[in-house]
Image: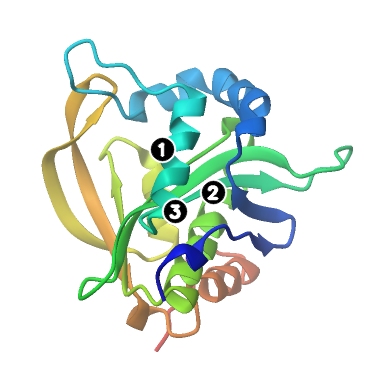
């Protein structure tokens, strides 16, 4: 299934909600990003053009919405229902991008999570939710995640979810002002016949960081 009907969509798992990013989220999004500047800076995508700048918040949302309308991206905010707040608060961002249909049926996934919420399983749960949606509802076959070798926190996410390490890509993406090497990880739908979220939550319920493997 592809076309305009793939977006917008909201995904829920317990208190965690993945929902579309909106223009009116700017104030809250900016506050979360500002207090995480030091935490996220080493992994931040940058513009390699001479004097290139990153887009403003509104430019980013406009671009992501355009990609969603073209069925090439799913731009989610990661939000969590928190005591004392009527609406779920922003705790991160997750974007499924570079969606390719036809004979490939694949996509790339990227994410960040508020440092204050790190270590609570938010990132792997969000990744599992989005991956399951892409496999089960959109019919995609492959999900890829590219990570800097030094980014231990992000590497732990793909390790917990049993994404396959597919090797090293030299100078793959422009990060924090320079072309940076990445490791590529991938998962195909056949590897999680019962769903990635089910496998991850089952492993978490057993009190381990590692998910149970499907036969």
- Label 3: element kind: helix
Callout 3 crowding tier (Cα within 10 Å): few <14, some 14–19, many ≥20: some
Q: Residue 41's image quarter? A: top left
What residue does disc 1 label? Answer: 63
In space, the residues marked 3 and 2 are separated at their CA atoms by 14 Å
Q: Of discs 3 and 2, which sits in the foreground?
A: 3
Q: Residue furthest top?
A: 51
- Label 2: element kind: strand
Q: Of discs 2 and 1, which sits in the foreground?
A: 1
Q: Residue furthest left?
A: 170
Tell me which numbered mark, 1 or 3, is placed earlier along the sequence: 1
Task: Work out whether 33 lies above or below 77.
Answer: above
Residue plotted at (60% across, 69% down): 201
Callout 1 crowding tier (Cα within 10 Å): few <14, some 14–19, many ≥20: some
Mark number displayed over residue 76: 2
Of 71 and 108, nearer the camera is: 71
Q: Is residue 139 visible?
A: yes
Picture quarter with the C terminus = bottom left
Callout 2 crowding tier (Cα within 10 Å): few <14, some 14–19, many ≥20: many
Tell me which numbered mark, 2 or 1, is placed earlier along the sequence: 1
Task: Work out whether 132 lies above or below 55.
Answer: below
State the scheme by which the image is colored.
Answer: rainbow
Q: Residue furthest bottom?
A: 215
Q: Position of residue 32 (x, y in %)?
A: 61, 26
Question: Are the residues at dot 1 and dot 3 in contact (C-beta closer than 8 Å)?
Answer: no
- Label 1: element kind: helix
Q: Residue 51's image quarter? A: top left
Of 135 and 159, nearer the camera is: 135
């Amino acid at each position: 299934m592809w076309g305009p009907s793939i977006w917008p969509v909201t995904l829920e798992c317990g208190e965690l909600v993945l929902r579309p990013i909106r223009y009116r989220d700017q104030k809250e999004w900016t506050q979360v990003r500002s207090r995480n500047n030091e935490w996220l800076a080493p992994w931040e995508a940058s513009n390699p053009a001479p004097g290139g700048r990153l887009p403003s918040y509104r430019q980013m949302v406009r671009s992501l919405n355009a990609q969603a309308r073209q069925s090439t991206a799913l731009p989610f905010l990661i939000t969590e229902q928190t005591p004392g707040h009527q609406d779920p608060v922003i705790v991160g961002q997750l974007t499924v991008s570079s969606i390719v249909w036809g004979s490939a049926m694949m996509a790339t996934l990227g994410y960040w999570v508020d440092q204050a919420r790190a270590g609570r399983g938010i990132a792997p749960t969000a990744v599992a939710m989005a991956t399951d949606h892409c496999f089960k509802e959109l019919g995609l076959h492959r999900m890829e995640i590219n990570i800097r070798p030094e980014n231990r926190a992000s590497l732990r996410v793909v390790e917990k979810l049993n994404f396959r390490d597919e090797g090293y890509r030299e100078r793959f993406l422009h990060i924090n002002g320079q072309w940076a090497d990445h490791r590529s990880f991938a998962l195909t739908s056949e590897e999680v016949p019962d769903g990635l979220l089910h496998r991850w939550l089952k492993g978490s319920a057993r009190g381990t960081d590692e998910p149970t493997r499907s036969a």
